[in-house]
Amino acid sequence: MSSVIVRIPTPLRGFAEGQSEIAAEGADVGAVLSAVGAAHPELLARVMKDDGQPREFVNIYLGSDNVRTLDGMDTPVGEGDVLSILPAVAGGAE
Amino acid sequence: MRARDRRLADIRSKVPEVSPREALDLQRSGAALIDVRDASEVAQGSPGGALRLDRSFLELRIEEAIPDLDRTLVVTCASGQRSLFAADDLRRMGYRDVRSLAGGFNGWKDEGLPFEIPKMLNADARERYSRHLVMPEVGEAGQLKLLESRVLLIGAGGIGSPAALYLAAAGVGTLGIVDHDVVDRSNLQRQILHSDERVGVSKVASAREAVLALNPAVNVIEHQLRLESANVEEVFEGYDVVVDGSDNFATRYLVNDACVKHRIPNVHGSVFRFEGQVTVFWPSREGDPGPCYRCLYPEPPPPELAPSCAEAGVLGILPGVVGLLEAVETIKILLGAGDLLVGRLLHYDALSARFSEFKQARNPECRYCADGAEFPGYIDYQEFCALAG
């Protein structure tokens, strides 16, 4: 088990009581996100599909690497790692 | 004998002179032909492929242009005298094989050898872009490239405003601006192209006025329309770079698909409240291709998770930062300078004052940009986004 910082993007902070970062424990990416989801189920539902994979408009990065290019949800995490959740945002012109 | 002639005779004993024909042969076998006349003389013509370095800056700039002290240099001027003085200085700087073109450019022309009228900046441009011209990454050649470039801005809003102003200021020759909207007072918190007195005016017309006030030489092309599958081909025609500052997912996917199809680099920026994302999508880049928008986000979020800036709000300065970063990447693409944000997503969190960089690989199975993929066609983007999730 490693303690990991999970960075919550602005559009999803409403589902995490406004927090920008949540500390959670787990051995891999999936376990850490599940731990976050146990406290914030609505947040997790917006990040992950029912099959446990990240949604198509969300990327999850371990440090600077997209976990899709690693071992996905099975990617092991280390003590003090940072997981960043980044959804697509569209704003710009209006 | 006059002092000047004594000095020239002395230099001739150290610097070999070559005929125009010999100079051309040397140039063809790898020597650098350096024209040291001033800009007004060069504007009348200069040997083809010559390096044009005004005599007054020669010693200061020669090493940036020719770092190899062993390369053969042939120096030319109008008649072959200034070139002797210049050659002697280059020899003393450490260049080991420096020669002077006897008869200079006049002799070169008389022999019927190839020359060109180089494209050059006029006096206004020389003054306006002087801070660019002294930088080796831009210089006169780079500035001329910018002046001949065509950039299309999607949106004259929060992102498009600073991008348009700075690209115009930098001397991008043609700026196309796409927007269907009119200026609203609530835009002015961030859309600095517009002004209080232009509330109610079309955004592209307002943008044109602001751009021309800053740099009247820019060719502004107004595309007053909502970008759609039916008009995207016509609008994108002829542009070198697209700067996406649109405000909705449907347009972003459309911009992506058209850029992929037409192999145009797509400089992307998007914002939400205090957060911005910037990257460059360029799957067709020679040698080192990057992902497209669909590689990064295969599908848009469902509408309830994608509130617009009107609904969610945005710090007015945030799209300014993002638009400037996009303008920087655009200039780098046009100049071919530096490392681009291709395959790298730059994330800016203004509240925590933190820039983070994330790697982004191509999706080898992307339907739009994978190697060998046939363009699958434009889709109904409104429906694609309405049904997302």
Image (cartoon, coloured by chain):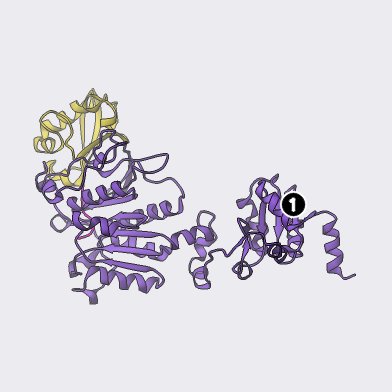
Chain colours: A yellow, B purple
Q: Nearer the viewer, residue B118 or B324?
A: B118
**Is the N terminus of chain B in the top left, top right, bottom left or bottom right quadrant?**
bottom right
Q: Nearer the viewer, residue A3 or B129?
A: B129
Highlighted range, magenta: A87-94
Q: Secondary structure at mark 1?
A: strand
Disc 1: which residue: B98
Q: Position of residue B231 (x, y in %)?
A: 22, 58
Q: Residue at x 29, y 43 (%)?
A: B292
Q: Nearer the viewer, residue B357 or B205?
A: B205
Tell me the amino acid under the disc marked 1.
Val
Q: Position of residue B233 (x, y in %)?
A: 26, 55
> Is residue B274 part of the magenta span, yes or no?
no
- Left or right for A86, reference B45: left
- Left or right for B8, reference B186: right
Q: Residue at x 15, y 59 (%)?
A: B310
- Left or right for B385, reference B274: left
Majority SS type along the magenta span: loop
What residue occupies the far right of the structure in this picture?
B1
A54 relative to B110, above or below:
above
Q: Position of residue B377 (x, y in %)?
A: 21, 46
Q: Badge 1: how crowded within 10 Å, few (<14), some, or many (20+)? A: many
**Is the C terminus of chain B in the top left, top right, bottom left or bottom right quadrant?**
top left
Report whether residue B350 is seen: no
Q: Residue at x 64, y 63 (%)?
A: B54
Chain of the residue under the numbered disc 1 shown in the image: B
Q: Nearer the viewer, residue A62 or B34?
A: B34
Q: Position of residue A10 (x, y in %)?
A: 19, 46
